[in-house]
Image (spheres, rainbow, N blue to C red):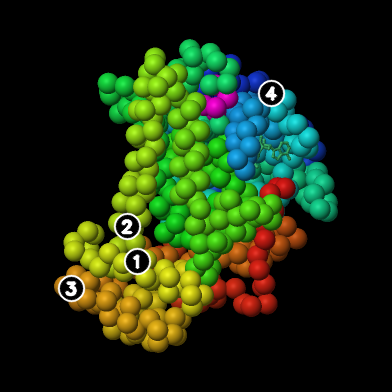
Amino acid sequence: MSLALGSLFTFDNSYVRDLGELCVPWEAAPAPEPSLVVLNDALAAELGVDAEVLRTPEGVAVLTGNARPDGAASVAMAYAGHQFGGYVPRLGDGRALLLGEVLDTRGQRRDLHLKGSGRTPFARGGDGKAPLGPMLREYVIGEAMYGLGIPTTRALAVVGTGEQVVRDRMEPGAVLTRVAASHIRVGTFQFAAATRDTDLLRRLADHAIARHHPAAAEADNPYLALYTSVVEAQAELLARWMLVGFVHGVMNTDNMTISGETIDYGPCAFMDVYDPATVFSSIDHGGRYAYGNQPAVAQWNLARFAEALLPLLHEDTDAAIKAATEVLLSFGDRYDRHRRAGMHAKLGLADGAGEDSALVDDLLALLQERKVDFTSFFRALARAAAGDPEPVRALVGEGVDAWAERWRAQLPARPGSETAEAMDRVNPIYVPRNHLVDEALTAAVAGDRGPWDRLLEVLARPFEERPGLEAYALPAPPSFGSFRTFCGT
Ligand code: AMP
Ligand code: MG
């Protein structure tokens, strides 16, 4: 295909340049009948890309990998990873390609990555394809996370391939274009470490430092500083997830980024009723990735990251282990600090100052016992701050009064309406509730994009209550039953 697309993306592929050994040049499978399903205009603008050009047949061909614009890399990236605790030495992009890196309008380097673009040498038993439903799911959840202000990869587009893919049943195939600060994962470091080529591992670490944690380069031990920065970024990310009731669902080490962005929206979902044991993924039988386990799993993954980094941390292995362990053990305090600050904001409390330390724990115990919808509770509590205790009573029951009295005693001295406004700025009223996402995806896959478009619009401004959107703020009706997500996406 002729490419008058030189102006579309200006690629600068630093990863391939620095770390060619960790990539395999590869071509996308042909998409027989590509058609644009959705394009993220706001993200295109952020990337400095002409959305109208992306909408042309040539643009759509780029978004399936079937036309390669000048300067594109088009490689499958190698990585390893612990999946549900078991080490897999060779995972890699089995159905994805790194198209290349672009500098966005703020000068930030972003990866463009195609998911569902066909089998690669890393495909193992997989078909290399992706069904439309799960790709639209990744799109909408990523946008919801972005709306919530949580670091995340985002989707630029979803393109139908015109092909059917085989899952439980036949489904339309699609390719998602994912935009990420990078696709460097803990599993990328595990892969590099397993080669025993310390020079390669060092180049990967140097690349990650330059790209994501540049301050580490100035430290006495830049690699220990890199490790510390990632531990801090993940501690903050995990706190952000927990504060909105997000359950990632497949926190394997290959799904944990070095940048601190959330990645890989497969079986993830938002918790409705507060319960630390909440699991949605149909294959997570042991509850390894349950809501309440997520911080501990993140720390476990970061231990695997430390193991991969050891050769860089100190020439003496014992000294390397000692240094890494100290940082790893700081995860708990870092996480607690972010979570505590976030919880205090959710409750309208001033950060820090002399609060009742059991206030948060007692609240969560109450929410769990009374099976209260996590998202609704904090919005209802803001009404109580503003002078109306009824909504929160209706949710929790009168048993909330004693707790609310303690909470009131901790509130800063300011008008209740101000406290309520501050709470509403951090407590979303709209999250991608499972029944809404399900309904929107079912309609979209059947050809009716209306509900999906509306959901996307609602989730773009999750803190701002808007008339007419009452149904989006409600938990699932009992008829929705218990929700399961599937990994075979
Ligand atoms: P994920 O569960 O999406 O994080 O993927 C884990 C691994 O399985 C990665 O190496 C993926 O590239 C690979 N994978 C997932 N689905 C497919 C598929 N349909 N075809 C080939 N590889 C896949
Ligand atoms: Mg993955």
Disc 1 to disc 2: CB gap under 8 Å? yes
Q: Nearer the viewer, residue 248 or 451?
A: 248
Q: What element does badge 1 sit on?
A: helix
Q: Residue at x 69, y 23 (%)?
A: 26
State which tag comes first along the sequence, 3 or 4: 4
- Label 2 SS: helix
Choose top left, top right, bottom left or bottom right for residue 78. top right
* Region of the chain picked out in magenta, as a range: 188-192
Q: Residue furthest left?
A: 413
What's the residue type where badge 1 is placed?
A: Val
* Pointers 3 and 1 in contact (C-beta within 8 Å): no
Q: Of the residues under marks 2 and 4, which one precedes in the sequence?
A: 4
Looking at the rendering, in which quadrant would you find the N terminus?
Answer: top right
Q: Secondary structure at mark 3?
A: loop
Amino acid type at circle 3 is Arg
Q: Residue at x 68, y 41 (%)?
A: 175
Q: Which mark is residue 297?
A: none
Mark 3 or 1: in front is 1
Which comes sooner in the sequence, label 3 or label 2? Answer: 2
Residue under pointer 3: 414
Residue ID for mark 2? 340
Q: Are marks 3 and 2 in contact (CB under 8 Å)?
A: no
Q: CA distance from mark 2 to mark 4?
A: 46 Å
Mark 3–mark 1 distance (CA, rounded to whole Å): 21 Å
Q: Is residue 207 visible?
A: no
Q: Tell me the distance, in whole angstroms, between the alpha carbons under discs 1 and 2.
A: 9 Å
Q: Return the residue at label 1.
A: 360
Quick check: marks 4 and 1 in contact, CB under 8 Å? Answer: no
Instruction: Give the residue type that dot 2 points to.
Output: Arg
The x, y position of residue 405, in whole percent, is 27, 80
Q: Give the residue type that dot 4 points to.
A: Trp
Name the disc covering residue 26, or none: 4
